[in-house]
Image (cartoon, rainbow, N blue to C red):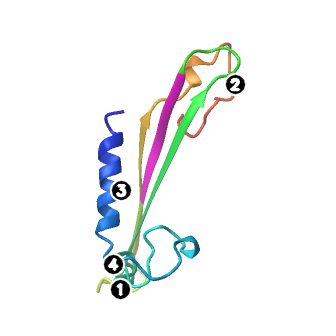
Amino acid sequence: MRLTRPLATLALSSLACTGVWAEDDIWTRATLLDTPGGTKQELKAIGVDMGLDVTNFLQALHNGGSGWANGGKVDLRVKLDGQKLGTWPGFFVTSHFEYNYGGSVNQDAPGLNVIAVNIALG
């Protein structure tokens, strides 16, 4: 729960840093921060493509077990295009950083479970 406030602050500050809100329709964008002429588009034009995904799970067991569990994961994907960055043509770097937070109901499920209740959180 201590991580929720910093993540919310990070999300709101990244929204504030995107410059002027675009005049386009927010529902037709590929992503929330993918505004025409925005920071994400400017970075992509010079060879840096970044994506951030946050997935949250609120879980409970309806047949046995106890309590609720809240957890999730944050995925950061970074792609670098060497030619656009001024280095070698055909040089690319791709990375994926993942952070899991909270817990899942897997350990609370009664009996022997061959398949976990929530495999996304492990």
Q: Amino acid at mark 4?
A: Val
Residue 32 x %, y % = 47, 67
Residue 9 x %, y % = 30, 51
Q: Amino acid at mark 1?
A: Lys
Q: Disc 3 or disc 2, which is closer to the eye?
A: 3
Q: Is residue 37 magenta?
A: no
Contact between marks 1 and 4 (CB within 8 A): the answer is: no
Q: Earlier in the sequence, mark 2 or mark 4?
A: 4
Q: Earlier in the sequence, mark 1 or mark 4?
A: 4
Circle 1 is placed at which residue position? Answer: 84
Question: Measured along the vertical axis of the image, is residue 41 above or below residue 107?
Answer: below
Q: Earlier in the sequence, mark 2 or mark 1?
A: 1
| Figure quadrant of the N terminus | top left
Q: Is residue 73 magenta?
A: yes
Dot 4, crowdedness within 10 Å: few (<14), some or many (≥20)?
few
Q: CA distance from mark 2 to mark 4?
A: 50 Å
Which residues fall within the magenta stretch?
68-76
Dot 1, crowdedness within 10 Å: few (<14), some or many (≥20)?
some
User: In the figure, is residue 114 to the left or right of 38?
Assistant: right
| Figure quadrant of the C terminus | top right
- The disc placed on residue 114 is 2
In depth, the one of 116 and 21 nearer the eye is 21
Q: Amino acid at mark 3?
A: Ala
Circle 3 is placed at which residue position? Answer: 11
Dot 3, crowdedness within 10 Å: few (<14), some or many (≥20)?
few
Secondary-structure class at tag 3: helix
Q: Amino acid at mark 2?
A: Val
Dominant SS in magenta? strand
Circle 4 is placed at which residue position? Answer: 20
Q: Residue at x 33, y 58 (%)?
A: 12
Q: Earlier in the sequence, mark 3 or mark 2?
A: 3
Q: CA distance from mark 4 to mark 3?
A: 16 Å
